[in-house]
Image (cartoon, rainbow, N blue to C red):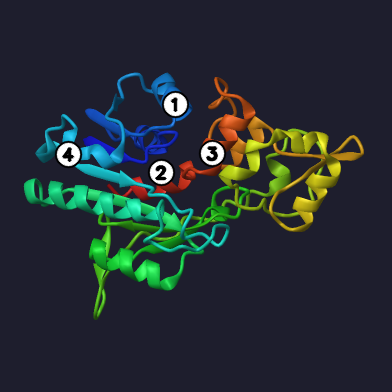
Amino acid sequence: MNVLSLFNGMNTGRQALENVGVKVNKYYSSEIKPYAIELTQYHFPDTIQVGDVTKWKEWNIDWKTIDLVLSGSPCQDLSAAGKRAGINGSKSSLFFVFIDILEHIKKLNPKVLFLQENVGSANKLDIGIMSRALGLYPVRINSKLVTAQMRDRYYWSNIKTKQTMFDIVTDIPQPKDLGIMFKDVITSGSVEREKALCMLQSIFSAQSLNKNQKSLIHRMKKRFIDGIFEDNKYRTLNKIEMCRLQGFPDNYCDILTTAKAGSLLGDGWTLPIIEHIFSFL
């Protein structure tokens, strides 16, 4: 397949395709975060970086050969953890750039497949706008089924669909519950919750929390962050634990600092969920 991945992040789409045995010919990545690009090129040096998604008309791509378009457009304006500016907010409105690109490809290749993801806490009005733009409604899957993390997400895809009385809907079944608990993925210490909270990009940008017990405990009580109890104090997640919560191998982010790894993992896709969706290709 020839794949175009928008808002590519840490390249979960490519890794998932490899893991389910889908042969990739060319993989185009649109990403601007330097350490996301660094991690992508480390694992897949043949990835073709095309740059800023808003400059897509300048990209040197044979558009008619694209078989699959991936998009995890920014959720900050949609999420309950954000300011709820909605789909027309400055960041989440980039969804419409994805729509422009998809429509451009469809004119040249009507059979192009796509996958779009966004947060489960998005407003129903915004979900309706996105669904009508894509011509189908999403499936809602929580990563808690396949990892130790609560991560509720919508996934729109024409990889597998069904027609209801009124609408076309994404027909990806729920994955099997693997029963993985938070305590199963920590490297040491103990935890109180059965499942970790949803990882958020912003949480891991300030590792000073590990040195400030008062601030860390405050965030834990407000349910902004998970803490692990060890040596009579709390600590934040380490790099291995964060990788496990998103279904990645322990060493996947070894080349990055903990803060950078947390940023990408917290903002990214859950690998086993994407593998599950791609198993229907």
The disc at residue 34 is 1
Under circle 2, the secondary element is helix
Q: Earlier in the sequence, mark 3 or mark 4?
A: 4
**Label 2 neighbour load within 10 Å: few <14, some 14-19, many 20+:** many
Q: Are marks 2 and 1 in contact (CB under 8 Å)?
A: no
Residue 118: horizontal and vertical position, in percent? Answer: 42, 55
Q: Which residue is mark 2?
A: 275
Please state which of the two labelled residues, at mark 2 or mark 1, is closer to the viewer.
Answer: 1
Which numbered disc, 2 or 1, marks the residue that appears first in the sequence?
A: 1
The residue indicated by pointer 4 is 57
Q: In the image, residue 55 lies at what x, y percent?
A: 24, 38
- In three-dimensional space, the C-alpha distance between marks 2 and 4, rounded to whole angstroms, equals 30 Å
Q: Dot 3 corresponds to which residue?
A: 265
Q: Mark 2 or mark 3, which is nearer the start of the sequence?
A: 3
Residue 247 in sight in this render: no
Q: What is the quadrant of residue 166 in the picture? A: bottom left
